[in-house]
Image (cartoon, rainbow, N blue to C red):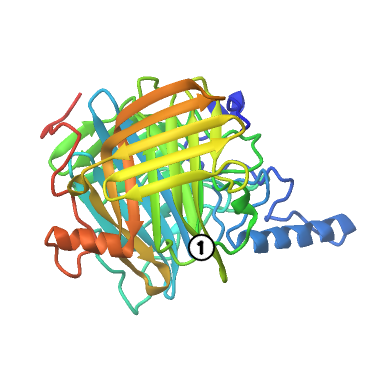
Amino acid sequence: MSSATPDPDERRGRGDPTDVSRSADRSGFSDQGGRGGRSPAGWLAGIRARTLAAYRATGADLPWGDLRRAHGVAMEGYFWRFTDVERSRVVIALIGVNRGPHGPWATVALAGSNGFLRTAALPGAWADPYGLGAASPGSDPHLSVVPDPAPPPDPPLPPVSPRRGGRTSVPPSAGNHLFVGNDRILRVDLGPDARLDLRLDPADTWPAHRALGGSSGFQLLPGLNQYWHPWLLGGRAAGEAILGGEIWRLDGAAVYGEKNWGKEGFPEAWWWGQAQGFAEPAACVAFAGGKVVAGPLSTTVTALVVRLPDGRLLRFGNPGTSPVRADIGPGQWHLDGRGRGWRVIVDGAGDPSAAHVLPVPLPSQQRNVAGDVEHLAARMAVRVERRGRTSWVGESTLAGLEIGGFDSAREELRRRGAPADAIDAPPAAPAGGRRDPRRAG
């Protein structure tokens, strides 16, 4: 398995922190076209741009493409996770930008390891076609279903007129927007007791010189039900979260970010995990697996990514060259990935009663349903071997571990005695995080 340290310029990141764009695809193509005109070069550029746009609209990406950019599929999901090792706290925030019959709408959630949870389905949503960014103007943060059949009262946020180079921005202030996020800021306002206001330093992004992202060769295949890319494997946050009756300072917390996208939401069943908070702050582990479907064809695959403490990046999940064996059950995750002389073994464990039950979208039905049982502060142990010799061993007690699926989520809600129409639930027995009813330094 090839490994490399992220490019220094990619690590630093430059520019306006409220500008969600970066650049067109490094493949040399741009679906913005160009001036075009009547020249042969302009005509060919237009054809090339339209062809790439149509290809990306299936969910696929060319090598060296910017996978963070919106594709135009039914669901574009954005996820941020913050691990505060010093205070043993974890915060997650997510937004799914969905295409429904009455226009775009958003699935949003904010949760903490103190057991807090707030979710909503919001009318109006926007995903950045030029870089990493998503937003929702929303209306009532306590809606459980987007109004139907009336169309959303607010149109999707329009990008500003593209400047040369194809850049655009999300409004720098959340203002009336209930969720605004990109690679430099994250602002969530789902009520006076559910707020997040952070600035991000995306120090360790996915290496720009790598041809393929988290989904590896699967990213080239059009029309899959799900694609995955962990674009941020390390960084720092600064700011504050309000979670119920607690105010948390998150200055210095480690940041992880990923994007997933596909047609009609999520697969029937999946598993996922992510951890920072190891003894070595630079280390990061993430995995995602499930049933991948394209028309009549399907296969089960798990992608596993490890950023070693020295900055080397290992990626497993190609069925032929670096397969990952996954043994997943209630409260248990075991992965074993091998390739090119490397081996990674991941063991995770968590009490199901300590997990949040989160909603996932059904884009075409314009509503959320229970679909995800996710631990925010579980245990993950990792061992990395190189040609049979141990290269790194790490353990985190602030790991995120997840089992996804409509049946498993409904069963967990039933086990907790939730109403039949419930789409989410906080932990029955919160684990991790220190309760702090007032401001924490």
The quarter of the rendered structure image containing the C terminus is top left
Element assignment for label 1: loop
Image position of 62 (left or right of 119): right
Mark 1 surroundings: few (<14), some (14-19) or many (≥20) residues within 10 A? many
Residue 303: give x, y in percent of width and height: 50, 45
Image position of 123 (left or right of 24): left
**How many numbered discs sit on the rendered protein?**
1
- Outermost right residue: 40
Q: Which amino acid does label 1 sit on?
A: Asn
Residue 151: give x, y in percent of width and height: 38, 75
- Outermost front residue: 388
The quarter of the rendered structure image containing the N terminus is top right
| Residue 12 location, quadrant | top right
Q: Can residue 171 be seen in this view?
A: no
Q: Can residue 271 be seen in this view?
A: yes
Image position of 223 (left or right of 37): left
The one of 160 and 381 positioned closer to us in this rendering: 381
Residue 232, relative to residue 87: is it above or below?
below
Residue, x 34% and y 79% (percent of image)? 149
Residue at the disc numbered 1: 225
